[in-house]
Amino acid sequence: MTDAQIAGGHKATINNPNTSQEAKEHSKKVLEEEFNGGDGKDPHLQTVKPDLTCTSVPKAGDTKEKNPGNVAGGLKSTLSNPNASEEAKESAKERLNKMGE
């Protein structure tokens, strides 16, 4: 499991209304200690604001390029999603055309 996935799990715990306060406090502590290290020198590490919102969370795949097949699949699903706005569908069409899909 990558650091990004671990940080994401703790961020989700903090923002999940169904988790206990104890679990939220534990996740906040882990994010502060493991992803900030107290020195704040590493720009890829997590910082936690006092209101428990997170900024600069490393995302899975930040260190590598995205799989074009997965990107195209996501864009195609946007086109058939009844909840997607027309603007989102137009953007997806344009991006698919640029990709040659």
Image (cartoon, helix red, strand yellow):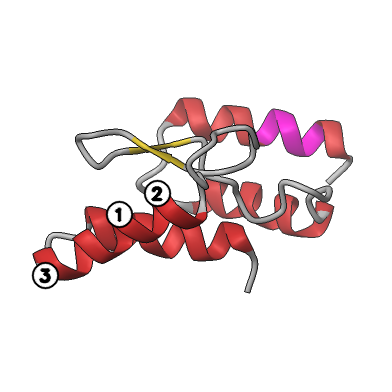
Closer-to-camera residue (68/89): 68
Which residue is painted at 21% across and 69% down in the image?
Answer: 23
Q: Looking at the rendered structure, which numbered label has been put on residue 20?
A: 3
Q: Residues within 10 Å of mark 1 (few under 14, many from 20)?
A: many
- Whether residue 30 appears in magenta in the rendering, the answer is no
Q: Which residues are magenta?
A: 93-97
As displayed, is residue 96 above or below residue 76?
A: above
Which three-letter amino acid code belongs to the residue tagged 3? Ser
Residue 66: percent from left, percent from top: 78, 50
* Res 52 → quadrant: top left
Asked if residue 96 is positioned above or below residue 16 in the image, the reply reads above
Q: Amino acid at mark 2?
A: Glu
Residue 28: mark in rendering: 1
Disc 2 to disc 1: CB gap under 8 Å: yes
Residue 93, quarter of the rendered image? top right
- Residue 32 got which mark? 2
Decide: marks 3, 1 in contact (CB < 8 A)?
Answer: no
48 vs 65, left or right, is left
Helix, strand or loop under label 2: helix
Q: Residue at x 74, y 51 (%)?
A: 72
Q: How many neighbours does mark 3 have within 10 angstroms: few (below 14), some (14-19), or many (20 or more)? A: few
